[in-house]
Image (spheres, rainbow, N blue to C red):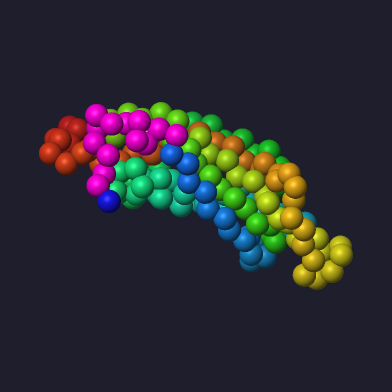
Amino acid sequence: MTAPTPDTPGLRLGLTVTHRRYVPYGQAHYGGSLVDGAYTLGLFGDVATEVAIRSDADEGLLAGYSEVRFLAPVQAGDVLEASCEVVRVGRRSRELRCWADVVARAEPGRGASAAAVLDPPLRVVEAVAALVVPAPAGEPAAPA
């Protein structure tokens, strides 16, 4: 794959990547099989890495969050979809809109292995993140 050039940022704007992951019971840290918020933020890091690979042919670095909103609890036994969309493109930075939805949830009250697909999915986290990628080849690095 050839990386997009700096003069064609439209190739990256709107790029959306989604990962789906089962939340294992070993991730539960709190009563009611609740999972800490860092678990979902870690998923955003994985998705942002794929965004950087697809848009810039480099793993990049998720540098930080300007906003994080925890909207509903994540529980062990959930199936999460974590997504990031490129909403702004700078020379070396990308602003990402991130969100996570529970698409299926365990139902232990019905049985030890019972679960159900959620329709509609439950939005559990929203965030805005900054992704940084290396300067394009041939361009000098920023001064330290």
Q: What residue is shown at x 70% (from left), y 46% (from top)? A: 121
Front-lying residue, 69 or 111: 111
Q: What residue is shown at x 62% (from left), y 61% (from top)? A: 22
**Residue 65 visible somewhere in the drawing:** no
Q: Is residue 36 above or below residue 134?
A: below
Q: Quadrant of the C terminus?
A: top left
Q: How many marks?
A: 0
Residue 104 falls left or right of residue 52: right
Residue stretch in magenta: 2-14
Q: What residue is shown at x 67% (from left), y 65% (from top)? A: 25
Q: Is residue 106 above or below residue 93?
A: below
Q: Position of residue 7 (x, y in %)?
A: 24, 29
Q: What residue is shown at x 68% (from left), y 38% (from top)? A: 71
Q: Position of residue 117 (x, y in %)?
A: 74, 55
Q: Main secondary structure of the magenta part?
A: loop
Q: Is residue 82 above or below residue 93?
A: below
